[in-house]
Image (spheres, helix red, strand yellow):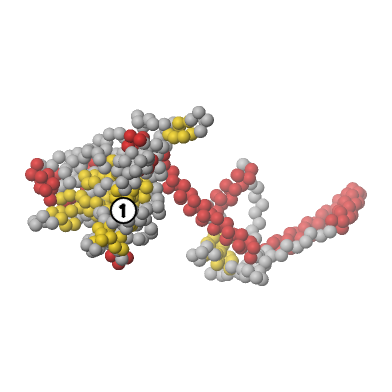
Amino acid sequence: MPTTSSKKRRVESPPPKSPVSSDSEAEADASEASDASDASEVPEAKARRQEAVVSSDSSDSEVEAAAASVQSCKELDTRPAQGGGAKGALRAMLHEEESGVFSHEVFEDELGNVNRVVYHPSPGKDVVLERPDKDCDDEWPLWRLMEKGRLAMKVNDELLGDLRKLANAVEPYRDEPPPPLVVNKQGKVVARADHDNRQHTMPEHIQWKLRSLPTALAEAIEEKYFLDIDETVVDKNGDKYHPKDVGTGSMCAATGFPHAIAYTKAKGRGKTKPVVEYIVAACNKVKLTVRLKKRDKSGVAVDVSSDELLQMLAPHRNTHRVHGDTETDYEQDMMLYLALEFADGDNNFARVPPSSFVQEPVLGALFAPAESAPYKGGHCEWPMKNGVGIIDFRIAKGVTTSALKKAHKGRKFRFVVKALNPFFCGLKGFTTRSRAFCIKGVLHNDVKSQERYVETSEGVVASLDADVSGKDE
């Protein structure tokens, strides 16, 4: 490939204005004299003089063309813009580049520093521009300006990608009306209005998709298989986590479940006795792990792959359904669904109503990312792989135990996980619930970071870092 190194360009100062003005006047006088003499010339003499002028013009054009050809990598284009003003000109330039008229290649490192640009002005012709020297090359500022423009475009592309993700995340709530506000006599907004009948993205009642199995097979599955939620409540030695004292709690799982255990005291008048409660904090991520278990011949529960269970369904699936049918897709996998319940509720799937809180959570969401109805492909439904399903999420802002309305004060929460596969959805053992816990905004008032205590035969002692349960990953 022939190469031409980048040449320096210098900006020359324009000539003084006064000489240009006098020269112009002299040329004008000469032009008037020439016109006067032309009128008196005979035709033959006039023709000879015009030929000389044409010859002189040709020589000047050749000189100008030669001068233009030695300019470094500069292409002259005298075509007028195709209408549309500045926007039209920009579009024409982009079209020219995309159509291959302006063909080039840019070579850069992983940090975006451009080392070389290869420009193809015509087929078979390459012009190579090497990176100029920062300290002694006049073209360095222009080169750096080009680099910064490319870097800015990359940043804009990343921001555009983030905006697309955000748009996809809020798409389910596009038509969700905002909850009305409660305003006091001074005109200050104090809370969201309590509208139990207001429509949220989550329906009040969920219609589960169910398919039946032969009675013998359904009973065999219920007898052996079940779902179970991992709970980090003991260390590797089997010692149970316990608060150090009334004022100091113990961490359990930094990001797993639950986060901590501590003594808590109900707020209000009068003296109440502190009680030990497990805590989930809105400031920490929750990593919930659900496992498929099987009881062996001795009755011991062991981990098992979900493929073993799905193979039992093969003879009972409707193979005549159209591929891509939602119900058919859920029959082929072990999909799970997560929700938040009150711990003192019955065993009917009952999500905590957003209206239970003094200030209703935005869009009625209890988790972040927000929940969506089952079978919608939202964040709160996820697949099991090899018998294990892991989901990461956070508690939504404003969803805490202390933010509950008076009618719900003192109630605890629990997670509920349900299988969405139509064959297992209605079977016993395929809806599992966690232990009860309270929700707090932060942990630093109750526990110290990474400090864990366990209850042993010798009392409550510190738990070593090496004894932290391996389930808290």
Q: Position of residue 62 (x, y in %)?
A: 72, 62
**Side of 249 where 40 appears, left or right:** right
**Side of 172 where 120 appears, left or right:** right
Q: How many labels does the image show?
A: 1
The residue type indicated by label 1 comes to: Ile
Residue corresponding to mark 1: 261
Q: What is the quadrant of residue 61 in the picture?
A: bottom right
Q: Say whether residue 446 is visible.
A: yes
Q: Where is residue 355 in the image (x, y as percent from the top left)?
A: 36, 35
Q: Position of residue 142 (x, y in %)?
A: 63, 61
Is disc 1 surrounded by few (<14), some (14 to 19) or many (20+) residues within 10 Å?
many
Q: In this view, does 423 lie above or below 132?
A: above
Where does the C terminus fall, quadrant-wise? bottom left
Residue at the front extreme of this rendering: 271
Identify the element where label 1 is drawn: strand
Q: Which residue is drawn at 69% across and 62% down?
A: 68
**Side of 48 where 319 appears, left or right:** left
Q: Which residue is drawn at 46% across and 50% down?
A: 161
Nearer-the-camera pick, 124 or 348: 348
Q: Residue at x 20, y 42 (%)?
A: 425
Q: What is the quadrant of residue 466 in the picture?
A: bottom left
Q: What is the quadrant of residue 323 in the picture?
A: top left
Q: Which residue is drawn at 58% across and 59% down?
A: 148
Q: Is residue 81 above or below residue 64?
A: above
Q: Say whether residue 321 is visible.
A: no
Q: Is residue 131 above or below residue 343?
A: below
Nearer-the-camera pick, 333 or 405: 405
Nearer-the-camera pick, 335 or 344: 344
